[in-house]
Image (cartoon, coloured by chain):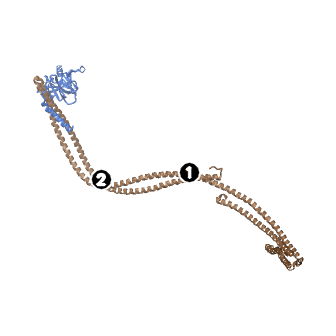
Amino acid sequence: MARNWTFGRLLGIGYALAGAILVVVAIIGYSSTASLIEDNARVSHTHQVRRELAALLADLINAETGERGYIITGDDTYLEPYNAGRTAVRATRERLVKLTSDNPEQQRRLQSLSPMIDARLEAFERALQARRTGGLPAAIASVSTNHGKDLMDRMRAIIADADRAEADLLELRSRAAAASAGSTERAILWGGIIGVALVALAGWYTVVALTRRVGSAVGGMQSSSAELQAAANQQAASAKEQAGAMNEIATTIRELIATSRQIAQSAQRVAHVAEDTEANARNGGGTVDKATASIESIRLQVDRIVNHMLDLGRKSQQIGAVLDIVAELAEQTNILAINASIEAAGAGDAGNRFSVVADEIRKLSDRVSGSTKEIRALIDDVRAAVNTTVMATESGSKAVDAGTRQFENVAASFTRILAMVATATEAAKEIELSTKQQATAVEQVNVAISNVAQASQETEASSGQILQTASELAGLSRDLARIIRPEARA
Amino acid sequence: MTDAELDLRAAVLRDAFDGSFAEPPPAVKDDSERFLAIEAAGTAYAIAQAEVAALFVDRPVAALPSAAPTCLGVAMLDGEPVAVHSLAGLLGHGASDGPPPRWTLRVAESALGLAFDRLDGQLRVPRDAIAPWQSGMMHTLIAASISADGATRPVVRLDAVVALLAGTREE
């Protein structure tokens, strides 16, 4: 059960036990001391009564001595001790009455003594009066009676009885005081020994219990501080990583904001472009109609070109026919020239000049033949070009027809495009609005991320403080462990 | 050919044509001999113009049965019926699946006509450019060769052709 007591309770119980022991010892000591003081007071009282009894007798004797000296000498100087004794006797008697008020036997003695004292004091006064008035003889006669001596003897006897009674009482009270002193001494001695032993036992138990429990707690605190250090280190590292990640996220979000703004601007431009496209698409319908008419005109022009090209081809063929004739003429001329040359050679010297003419004619025919070949090649090229052109124009005509059909499709497509562009314009406006909202949201996220990053940095700083505190706690626990168990090495 | 090239070519031809009338007649050169450049069975030959009486083109040849395998028939040349033989056949080229020869020449001082495929032109060859026919390439109808326009043409001896055909008839 004591194991479950708290540290304060354990110390409180220990100190309470020690205090209780001290209280018991103090009570016993106080009681013994009080009894001792009372006994000592009674002893002193008894001594004081005995001294007053002795003083009463001495005062009576002093008064008697003064009375006798005056009677004998008649000197008034002897009256001083008489008067002092006479006054002191009465005062002493009053003190004795008070001092023995608790003792009936002594009160009875004093009551019996008091008339005797008064009688004796009156006797002294009569003797002194006799001395004054009758002189020495009268005084001697006054004192020569045995009455005064008997009275003094009885008073001495009564005082002696009272003194014996006080002596007996003193002995009794001295014994009681000695008993009280012994009891007090024993109470203080044994009470101190027992109290010290019990306090030492309670202290030992408290120290052992506290050492065990505080040691266990310090061990736990060391382990906890080590775990706290590790946790603080991990938390600091995590907070640092989190702060870094938050910074990266913040950077990314800033880039995202810039991108969102660019997207918003692009969406705005797209919206404008879509509006322009819609307007252009509306104009495009009319343009397509015009283009269709233009294509029809082009088709007619192409037909004309084809016809012209066919005419050109036919004329080229006619030129070729004429050229065939020219070539044939050139060939015949060449043959004639050769034959003329042969004939001229057969005519001997007379034919030499004719041979020269024949050669010139032959050369001329050769050049004509070469020219006709070149012209034929050119005509062939022209005819090939015409054929190619005709084929191309026919293909173009077909392409124009196909284009016309395509333009009809284009016109239909333009109608659809117009509707789609209108839809796209609305979508672009919605995208622009959504993008602006998105940019605003991203900016809010950026603010939140910045707050989180700041919180992470604060967490990192707090982790550092926790780490420092944990380190200090670990050091403190080691110091505490060394204080509790010096042999322990944390 | 571009228009500018055509214009340039026409200008050159006109200048040559006009210049031919302005130039003086060339002097007669005795150190050259004239040849007809022909082509038979895809091979270029030359024939001395002195051995040719006349040249014809696209003259109809009436086919006649003959013992000579090279005889194509009879044609009217200069108003006389002349036997026309295939020069390619005489030179040993095999029968051709192509069109019949367009050109015909009449051998001088003989009623013989030789048909060939194409006339390349007339050549004036210096005498020192006429070389004897190489022995390794001996042919009874070829005596020499000429070099003209960067090519060598064997010269067909028409007299040998006439003699060959005459010998064939005698047999």
Q: Earlier in the sequence, mark 2 or mark 1?
A: 1
Q: Which mark is residue A413?
A: 2
Q: Nearer the viewer, residue B53 or A146?
A: A146
Say whether residue A375 is visible.
no
Q: Is residue A161 above or below residue A393?
A: below
Q: Which residue is mark 1?
A: A230
Q: Nearer the viewer, residue A335 or B33?
A: B33
What color does chain B have in the rendering?
blue
| Residue A194 image position (x, y, % from top left) | 74, 59
* Element class at badge 1: helix
User: Could you tell whether A149 is left or right of B163 in the image?
Assistant: right
| Residue B45 image position (x, y, % from top left) | 20, 25
Question: How many C-alpha atoms fall within 10 Å of the one at disc 1: few (<14), some, or many (≥20)?
Answer: some
User: Could you tell whether A163 is left or right of A215 in the image?
Assistant: right
Q: Amino acid at mark 1?
A: Ala
Question: How many C-alpha atoms fall within 10 Å of the one at disc 2: few (<14), some, or many (≥20)?
Answer: some
Q: Amino acid at mark 2?
A: Ser
| Residue A68 image position (x, y, % from top left) | 86, 74
What color does chain A have in the rendering?
brown
* Element class at badge 2: helix
| Residue A399 image position (x, y, % from top left) | 25, 47
Q: Nearer the viewer, residue B107 or A414?
A: A414
Q: Nearer the viewer, mark 2 or mark 1?
A: 1
